[in-house]
Amino acid sequence: MRNCLLNLASNSEVELKSLEEFVSFAVELSRREICSPSIPIVLLSDTFDIFTLDQCEKLFAYVENNVNIWKEDMFFSGCKNNLLRMCNDLLRRLSRSQNTVFRGRILLFLAKFFPFSERSGLNIVSEFNLDNVVEQSQDTSSLENFETSEENDEEIKFKIDYNFYNKFLSLQDFMRSPNQCYNKVRWRVFVNSATDVLAAFQNFKLDADQYQDKPIHDHISEATSSTFFAKYLTNPKLLELQLSDPDFRRSILIQFLIILQYLSSPVKFKLGSYELKPDQQDWIKEQVTLVYQLLAETPLNSHSFAQSVKHILAREELWNNWKNAGCPEFKMPGNVEEKNSTKTKVRGKKRNIGELIKEATAENKYYMGHPELTRLWNLNSNNLEACKAKERKFLPDFDEYFEEAIMQMDPEAAIEPEYKKVKDPNFGWRALRLLTQRTSCFFISTNNPVTGLPDYLELILKKIVQDRPQNSNGEIKQEVLNTEAEEVEDLLKSEEKEMQEDGGEENTTEPRIALHLLKSVSNLIGEHWKTLGTKLGLEKKEIDKIIKEKLSDSESAEKMLKIWIDVDVDASPENLAYTLEGFNLNEAAEVLKVNKQ
């Protein structure tokens, strides 16, 4: 059939319709099990290889119109790889600048053909387009010799110099690779540049009278009828004009919202060290509020535009959660009437309670006899781990809870004893509960007898205050304590020493991944160990050191995995298996999963 098609296609006078009919004939033969289901796509691939780009664009309409055929169960499993290879070959032949429409049709077809859960079309390992580099102009004379008139000085409330230009464009490098922000030094650079740029946007406000709000469909018609550049120019002389453009401002502010949302969102493939401190998270929340405020102040349908951006980013959070859950397949919900009918049928049946308990035990679940109780008991298979969850930590902050009581202990406050916080029995009961969880001083015996709960709380708080740096000058405020302070300090040091010794013994436990598993997985990783090591967070110098040893691929992979296990606190068979699936190393990932079971 391939030879017949090539003979037919080599004829210059043949019509395109004849080739389409020949492929349709092959589809019918496949349905009757006369030929393989992959033959129609193979024939189309051969035809695209010998056709010109203009002919390929016309023939591709046949592929688009018959997408329902390729998605049938009979053709999908056997044709999806060939179809993907055919489309990728076409994309390599097409120019990014001259054949943009045809390239877009191919990408849209692939999006319609493959389901959402298809791993080949997902950025599972959370990679960034690091090749998208914004080049900065090194000509400082254009800004150093830039002289503004008096009118411009009145309108512009900040100075556009080379320093501001450099900070403004340096932010594009963080937008390109947001993981730089998890480095302490780079974080300071990002915060400094972002603060200056947003402050400039605040000071240099656009005059809303110059821009008249129009219905959204008018903007769409204007945008489609005019041409625009995909990237803005970076000439320093144009910066002032660009800052006066509402569209330019919106693009920069949206970039801020995207990177701030990424930094504060949980991503499964982030390294364990990629975590923000509480003060960094607070700064991000403040900047998000400021950016939305600036979007609302930007002319041209500001309020509706800001709401649209907020809605889009909320949808992005849903997609992020879907990827963190392993990209489960989407299923269409059933008919409401069918659900109701099935529910009534299930209610009519009475099953033996012993069978229900037996089935639940086989699935490692609990059956409590009531749907709500059963749901609550099965939220987590391990009740102890469920009690240790972060959302179940209800203890208040130690410093905030005792702040008022400590201030009342100061003689300068002149608080009468009966009005002190420690006299409140409710406060005292909660204070004892908090002391047992947050400090070891509660369990230290003293020689002085305690007459009552208020006196005991004041004694404990005096012992705790000595380690707290409190005054505004940054100096440590040392309280005058009784002679028992030295005894308490010695006891605390001895306990700390014992904890360190216990911790040293715990570190001698077995590795988190068995050695025989490492060898098996390393043999399957092979030549991919370099790219896998980079994704797992190994530094370049560590990978170069392994290369210099001139080991085999399997030995190099095994050594790389050992280094990763020693460095990464989150190293586990589950995380390694998920990363291997992202690189299509499914056999190696299956070894880890089978041995875990």
Image: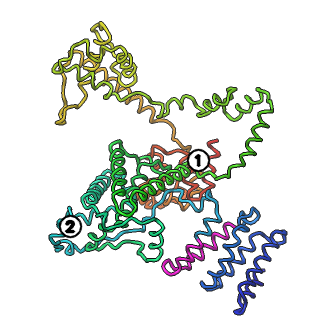
Q: Residue at x 25, y 22 (%)?
A: 406
> Please, what secondary structure does the residue beneath circle 2 have?
loop
Residue 161 is tagged as 2
Residue 372 left/right relative to 425: right
For label 1, the residue is 517
Asked if 325 appears above or below 529 in the picture, the reply is: above
Quadrant where the N terminus sits is bottom right
- Rate crowding at label 2 as few (under 14), some (14 to 19) or many (20 or more) other CA atoms within 10 Å: some
Between 570 and 323, the one lying in front of the other is 323
Between 159 and 149, the one lying in front of the other is 149
Q: How many marks?
A: 2
Asked if 70 appears above or below 398 in the picture, the reply is: below
Between 251 and 321, the one lying in front of the other is 251
**Residue 541 visible, this orientation:** no
Between 92 and 55, the one lying in front of the other is 55
- Span shown in magenta: 79-106
Q: Residue at x 68, y 52 (%)?
A: 332
Asked if 505 appears above or below 156 in the picture, the reply is: above
> Please, what secondary structure does the residue beneath circle 1 have?
helix
> Closer to the observer: label 2 or label 1?
2
